[in-house]
Amino acid sequence: MPVKQRFLPMRRRIDREINRGRFAYKGELIAGLTASYGTLSSDDTEFLVILEHIDLNGTLATVKPFIGYFYRDNRCIGVRFGYEHLDGHLGNADFNLGEQNDLTFNINSLAMDNDSYSFALFHRSYVGLDPRGRFGLFAELEASAVLGSGRFSTNAEDPAKSTYSDNLRLKLAFNPGVAVYIFPNVCATVSLGLGGIQYNKVTQRDAAGNRTGSRSASKMRFRLNIADINFGMVLHFWDKKRP
């Protein structure tokens, strides 16, 4: 009795010709850089009524050089290195649950900064959007490891107190984007971080370097992160056989 197949074999499926629009060719090498920079500033503002007189400012900057190789048309594997700096300062924030709850308190003079270094392996799949291969979309899957150190301090007390931390982050992320050739071998890109699977571990130390505690967490989240929008420039290198 013949066995009924639920799905058609690969040779009989419809070829949607997604790869017909070539954006990059087998044998190409790429070298590029992505970077992002963002700031946050708040002066005597309110948030959800219960937080008042918020004075806050912060900065987030990242730089990530990378190299890659196209092992087939529109398919690339590569490595990426990165540096990230994060700092913030909370000058004041008043927490007020109202007179009926009789709960108010003030937070002030808090500061934090963090520096991290990363290494990642990535795979990109491109799709050309026009016959001449000038515009394209790509889907990137990235596996990364991030090591960093940070400092959290408060000047609200005398003397000031500081806590230091060593940070480890392992992440499997999905980063789609758009690519446009602005010169024959120079491509501009914009990529969006849509989340992924992540594991974090933080080890805390005091000013003398003694371990005071640790915490770890893992999560899976897929959504747009506006703090993970990266602009990049990519150089494409090819030999004389490129069509």
Image (tube, rainbow, N blue to C red):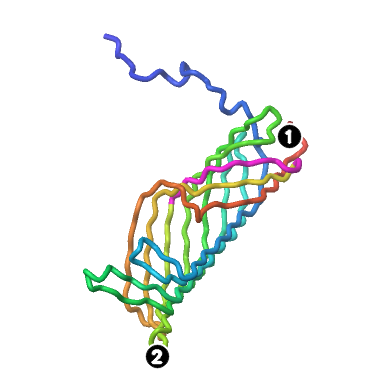
Task: Determine whether, in the image, residue 152 is placed left or right of residue 229.
Answer: left
**Element assignment for label 2:** loop
Decide: is 153 above or below 232: below
Q: Is residue 19 magenta?
A: no
Residue at the spot of label 2? 158
Q: Number of labelled discs?
A: 2
Question: Residue 182: horizontal and vertical position, in percent?
Answer: 73, 43
Residue 44 in sight from this viewpoint: yes
How many neighbours does mark 1 have within 10 angstroms: few (below 14), some (14-19), or many (20 or more)?
few
Question: Residue 206: horizontal and vertical position, in percent?
Answer: 38, 82
Q: In terms of sequence position, does the residue under pointer 1 or pointer 2 come before the other?
A: 2
Disc number at residue 75?
none
Amino acid of disc 1: Arg
Q: CA distance from mark 1 to mark 2?
A: 68 Å
Q: Quadrant of the N terminus?
A: top left
Q: Nearer the viewer, residue 52 or 110?
A: 52
Magenta stretch, residue numbers: 172-184
Please give the name of the residue rendered at 56% of the width and 27% of the height, measured from the top-left corner: 18
Q: Main secondary structure of the magenta part?
A: strand
Amino acid of disc 2: Asp
Please give the name of the residue rendered at 51% of the width and 68% of the height, measured from the top-left corner: 58
How many neighbours does mark 2 have within 10 angstroms: few (below 14), some (14-19), or many (20 or more)?
few
**Element assignment for label 1:** loop
Residue at the spot of label 1? 242
